[in-house]
Every structure is written in structure tokens, then in C-alpha cells.
Amino acid sequence: MIGGRSRRILITGGNAGLGLALAKKLARHHKLLLSGRKSQIEVSDTLPRGAGYIVADQADPEMSTLALVRGIRDFGWDSLDNAVLNAGIGVAPGEGFDSTEAIRQTLDVNLMAAILQAQALFPLLEKSKGTLTFIGSVVHTGSATIPAYAASKAGLHGLARALRSEWKGKISVQVLHPGPAKTGIHDKAGYDPGRMRALFLKSDDMASMMASAIASRRSPLTLSWVRYLNGGAILGRRL
Ligand SMILES: NC(=O)c1ccc[n+]([C@@H]2O[C@H](COP(=O)([O-])OP(=O)(O)OC[C@H]3O[C@@H](n4cnc5c(N)ncnc54)[C@H](OP(=O)(O)O)[C@@H]3O)[C@@H](O)[C@H]2O)c1
């Protein structure tokens, strides 16, 4: 906890993978509101006890942003200490080229929804001088195998830099760039990392690095093996 205070934390994509691992880590000390595409019934056994849940399918960026804002209000919150915009997808291109549909879906879910969410959540974060965190990826600098995904993450990097400057003094804005971690995202994307998978970090360790990176409010931050080997999953500030 920062200053021993329980915080109101929203995590998009909080029902699986890194978002869920982060939520489980924070659930003991903080109040959580999670979102995802799946229905409440599908995820009710998965979520940490006490966490609220909002169905918000980011394939429709406008509708999902409205659903998020409505869900926060219905949960009784009028402010946020942290918003972690983590939901994301990848789509591995079939014949070396992404289909137009896959490009649009990737940009809608990963980038467009995050832009609209950032704008919509700003007033709630401003009330508590909170922190807005975008979850990017180390591939934001470019990747041969998943170009649309890399482009969406490069977009988040630029967006975070712009908003960090624009909203300076009002809220903190940061972008975190995780390296590969063991979650379901690669299988869902139709991408087989093969033997490289053995080198992926455990989602729990990545979530620990995310939590201390969020507490630090620094940006941009790369969360990869180098940080992990330097104690990134056990050292650093606690959220
Ligand atoms: N794992 C890695 O190696 C890695 C590396 C770098 C960056 N990242 C980034 O980390 C974030 C989390 O990834 P992950 O590995 O935890 O993936 P994951 O296990 O596949 O989880 C993805 C999360 O995003 C949600 N999501 C997907 N499509 C959505 C949609 N259309 N609308 C709303 N929510 C949606 C999922 O909800 P549903 O289950 O309801 O679909 C799920 O909660 C992503 O932004 C990813 O790009 C991951």
C-alpha cells in the first residue's frame, strides 16, 4: 500500500493472464474493479473475492468505454486512484500479412479503446490525483511476426508520452512494456513461440513487477528478464 491507504483500482482485462495475476496480488489491500469481454457468470469463479466486474468488449471501443464508465458509477465509485488499461489481443498473420479485419480488431481493442478510456476516466482519476497505466509491450519498437500488434503498442507508447505531458500536475500517466510472459495470449493469437516459451516469465512474477512499476509512477518502463534478474519481482515500491 502507498501510505497504508486502500486504493480504488480499475484493471481492464482483469479476468485472465497478467491482469488477473495483478488483481490477485492487489486484492488483499485494495478495492478492485475488473473488466473483460466474458460474462460475469463465466468469470465469477476466477475473480478475487470482493472484486467487482464489468463486461466491456473493447472490440467496440465506444460502447465498451460507456459500459466501463457506467459500471464504475454503478459500483458506487466517483473517483479512481489507479486505472490499469491492460486488456489486449494479438492476432498472428496467416500468410505473413494481417487481414484488414485482424488489423482493425487489434487496433480497436488495444489502442482505440484505450484512447477513449483514458479520456473518459481522466475526471475520475483527477479527483484523487491518480495514476493511469497503459500496458504496452517490448515489441512496441517493432516485431517481425506481429506487425499490427506491434503498431498498437507503439501507439500506446506515443499516447502515454503525450498524455503524461498534457496531464502533468493533474494525474500521472505511464506506459509499461512487459516482455514475454506465460499467459494464454499467444495461443489465442494463433502464435506458437515453440521452445522460446520456456524463457517466458511466470505471469505472477510479471504481475509483481507491474505492481511495483505502477507504484513508482515512472514511465516508460520495460519489464523483462533484465529487470527480473535485478530483483524486479521482489524489490521496489509496494502498491
Ligand atoms: N503475455 C505476454 O507475453 C505479454 C507481453 C507483453 C505485453 N502483454 C500485454 O499484456 C496485456 C495482458 O495480456 P495477457 O498476456 O494477460 O493476455 P490474456 O491472458 O490473453 O488476457 C487478455 C485479457 O484481455 C481481455 N480482452 C481480450 N480481448 C478483449 C476485448 N475485446 N474486450 C475486453 N477485454 C478483452 C481478456 O478478457 P476475456 O478473457 O474476457 O477475453 C483478458 O482479460 C495485453 O495488453 C498484452 O498485449 C502481454
Image (cartoon, rainbow, N blue to C red):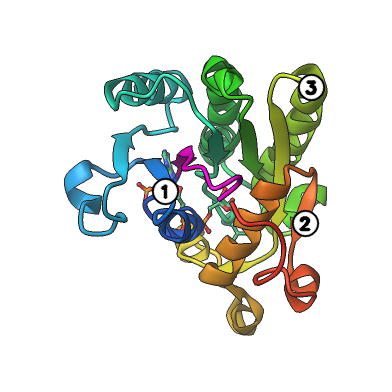
Q: Is residue 41 magenta?
A: no
Amino acid type indicated by mark 3: Lys
| 224 displayed left or right of 72 | right
Q: Residue at (57%, 56%) from the top-left corner? A: 92
Q: Position of residue 74 (x, y in %)?
A: 27, 22
Does the CB distance between marks 2 and 1 fall below 8 Å? no
The disc placed on residue 222 is 2
Q: Which residues are magenta?
A: 1-12
- Front residue of 192/76: it is 76
* Residue type, label 2: Thr
Query: Does the magenta run of residues contain 3?
Result: yes
Give the CA distance from mark 3 to mark 1: 27 Å
Mark 1 residue CB less than 8 A from any atom of ligand 1: yes
Q: Mark 1 — residue?
A: 14
* Earlier sequence position, callout 3 versus callout 1: 1
Numbered-mark total: 3
Q: CA distance from mark 2 to mark 1?
A: 21 Å
